[in-house]
Image (cartoon, grey):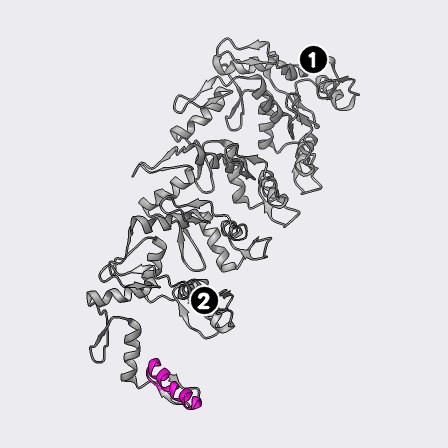
């Protein structure tokens, strides 16, 4: 009667297969216990029964004699075709009496039923990570994760796989034609199912919902991967640095960082990449392909992530908040990078000089200092730059474009970052403090320059006269004293200046602008520094001291004049 009811109470504890009759189970057990006399001469796999070997050989020959007359799909085995036909005929599938879920294959239903009844009592434990399995075969498959064994080899190209199922999918690439084409973008696929999954990119359909956080996914595999985030379990640990991962695939990708392996090469420029996904993104630079378009302003992007970032410029949404300082970010990845500022973590080290960096991108930029590589060239003047961003900034010197405006004073800037720094003048914010003297600065860059005053460090030396400077920029300015170059010219009177800042000061002599006013007497000054010096008249402060006689002066100029009296006496 069990044959008619479909019930299969007898289950193999080695491979999970179920049978209606105990005798059938006993016969099946020979597969696991009896000597396997029949060997495949293509891949070396051994079988108990000759008929099983014959079926197996069809995998290598690509023979699929059983064809569906509804859709033309072909199968190696008649039984698989019968299961497939249920999709077209609407024949009742194998339905779970507990939750109503249906399955095409009876074996799939039997596996599912164990989720309700708790499965068999036997437990097979992995001695590597402690994970438990109900079946010996499941443990055996799991162990491949730890051993990295890839026993299933493609006879056509030699590629190896951990699982037979993955090999079978791969072999379709050799034997099948991509006959299923997407009507939206023209991309072709081996199976109708693959195409339907792909079309969800166009339709935006995401039928799989996470019960923990309401995130939705187009594929059930993506949902399962995502759900591991909530469990927090990271079983796969890197033996080099101890970092743990939720997925074995992520660990494998991570290991390439240590090995330096970059197996994916661009056939246009030869550049090599660790990850295939990164290569795909890179190739779009050569093709100019920008498939992701903003429906607000029409701007297009190479990758979807950049479009998502751009969309926040319209919405202004920043859902991820730093719990240390309250700063908000559009992306959780950007927040994670920001958190390294608080933790002080600098995991990326330059193997040339040992300098460490918080971000990998910053290390890549730094390495170009050693290599001297400047791949980004201005087509206006020929000047080259290490980083593309620096070239883009430089281009504004030709176009004069300053799109970022301060809403406090109306001053315009080429870069958004420069505007942000400028705004600190209005807010009075000085977050960067010197731990030597307590002086605060608006920018970290200025603090670094200031710290060199305490250390006395002057690493930049003039090769003409030997004079040393704290900052490289000051050395460049000094070099003009030897060359006589004065690149900054006043358009009003033609006077030239070594420094752009001096030109700006000079321009105020033409405009008559005196924005800095003394709150004691109302006198106005062109420069803030001149106002500060003027204030000494009111305060009586004389900060400039003669080292020879100890006399104090209000003005530095007056001190210099006074010091000549000492040198002239010595000369006499």
State the residue in front, 113 or 31: 31
Sequence order check, earlier mark of 2 and 1? 1
Q: Main secondary structure of the magenta part?
A: helix
The percent coordinates of residue 549 (x first, y second) are: 42, 91
On screen, residue 270 versus residue 546, left or right, reads: right
Residue 567 forms part of the magenta stretch: yes
State the SS at label 1: helix
On screen, residue 166 versus residue 294, left or right, reads: right
Height in image: 28 above or below 397?
Answer: above
What residue did someone put label 2 on?
A: 449
The percent coordinates of residue 284 (x first, y second) are: 44, 34
Marker disc for residue 466: none
Query: Which quarter of the rendering shows the C terminus?
Result: bottom left
Are there few (<14), some (14-19), or many (20+) residues within 10 Å of tag 2? Answer: few
Q: Is residue 187 visible?
A: yes
The percent coordinates of residue 192 (x first, y second) are: 48, 20
The percent coordinates of residue 255 (x first, y second) are: 62, 43
Height in image: 365 above or below 194?
Answer: below
Q: Is residue 543 visible?
A: no
Residue 104 forms part of the magenta stretch: no
State the residue in front, 522 or 126: 522
The residue range painted magenta reads 553-572
Proximity of marks 2 and 1: CB atoms separated by less than 8 Å: no
Height in image: 457 above or below 39?
Answer: below
Of badges 2 and 1, the one in the foreground is 2
> Which residue is drawn at the image coordinates 45% and 66% (left, top)?
449
> Which residue is drawn at the image coordinates 40% and 41% (left, top)?
306
Query: Which quarter of the rendering shows the N terminus?
Result: top right
Are there few (<14), some (14-19), or many (20+) residues within 10 Å of tag 1? Answer: few
Height in image: 165 above or below 375?
Answer: above
State the residue in front, 373 or 538: 373
Marker disc for residue 54: 1
């Amino acid at each position: 009667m069990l044959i008619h009811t479909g019930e299969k109470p007898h289950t193999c504890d080695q491979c999970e297969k179920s049978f209606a009759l105990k005798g059938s189970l006993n016969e099946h057990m020979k597969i696991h216990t009896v000597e396997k006399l029949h060997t495949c001469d293509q891949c070396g796999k051994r079988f108990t029964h000759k008929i099983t070997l014959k079926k197996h050989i069809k995998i290598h020959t690509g023979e699929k004699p059983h064809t569906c007359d509804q859709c033309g799909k072909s199968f190696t085995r008649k039984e698989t075709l019968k299961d497939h036909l249920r999709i077209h005929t609407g024949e009742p599938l194998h339905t779970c009496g507990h939750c109503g879920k249906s399955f095409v294959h009876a074996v799939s239903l039997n596996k599912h039923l164990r989720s309700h009844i708790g499965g068999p009592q036997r437990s097979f434990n992995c001695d590597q990570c402690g994970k438990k399995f109900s079946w010996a075969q499941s443990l055996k498959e799991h162990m491949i994760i730890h051993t990295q064994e890839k026993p299933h080899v493609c006879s056509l190209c030699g590629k190896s796989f951990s699982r037979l199922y993955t090999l079978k999918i791969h072999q379709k690439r050799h034997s099948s034609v991509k006959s299923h084409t997407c009507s939206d973008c023209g991309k072709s696929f081996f199976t109708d199912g693959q195409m339907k999954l792909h079309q969800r990119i166009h339709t935006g359909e995401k039928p799989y919902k996470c019960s923990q956080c309401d995130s939705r996914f187009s594929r059930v595999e993506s949902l399962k991967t995502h759900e591991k985030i909530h469990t927090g379990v990271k079983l796969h640990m890197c033996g080099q640095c101890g970092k743990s991962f939720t997925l074995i695939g992520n660990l494998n990708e991570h290991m390439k960082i240590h090995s330096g392996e970059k197996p994916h090469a661009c056939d246009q420029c030869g550049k090599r990449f660790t990850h295939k996904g990164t290569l795909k993104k890179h190739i779009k630079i050569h093709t100019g392909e920008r498939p992701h378009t903003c429906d607000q302003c029409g701007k297009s992007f190479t990758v979807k992530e950049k479009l998502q970032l751009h969309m926040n410029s319209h919405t202004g949404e920043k859902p991820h908040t730093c719990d240390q300082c309250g700063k908000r970010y559009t992306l959780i990845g950007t927040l994670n990078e920001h958190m390294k500022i608080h933790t002080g973590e600098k995991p990326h080290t330059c193997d040339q000089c040992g300098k460490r960096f918080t971000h990998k991108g910053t290390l890549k930029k730094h390495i170009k200092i050693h290599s001297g590589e400047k791949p980004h060239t201005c087509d206006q003047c020929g000047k080259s730059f290490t980083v593309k961003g620096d070239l883009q900034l430089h281009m504004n010197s030709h176009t004069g474009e300053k799109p970022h405006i301060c809403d406090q004073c109306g001053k315009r800037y080429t870069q958004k970052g420069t505007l942000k720094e400028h705004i600190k003048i209005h807010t009075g914010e000085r977050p960067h403090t010197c731990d030597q003297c307590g002086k605060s600065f608006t920018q970290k860059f200025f603090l670094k320059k200031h710290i060199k005053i305490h250390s006395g460090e002057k690493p930049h030396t003039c090769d003409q006269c030997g004079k040393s400077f704290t900052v490289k920029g000051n050395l460049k300015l000094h070099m003009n004293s030897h060359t006589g170059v004065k690149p900054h010219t006043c358009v009003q009177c033609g006077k030239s200046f070594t420094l752009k800042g001096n030109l700006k000061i000079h321009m105020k002599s033409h405009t008559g602008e005196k924005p800095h006013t003394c709150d004691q007497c109302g006198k106005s000054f062109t420069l803030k520094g001149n106002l500060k010096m003027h204030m000494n008249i009111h305060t009586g402060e004389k900060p400039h001291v003669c080292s020879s006689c100890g006399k104090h002066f209000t003005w530095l100029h007056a001190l210099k004049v006074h010091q000549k009296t000492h040198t002239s006496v010595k000369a006499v």
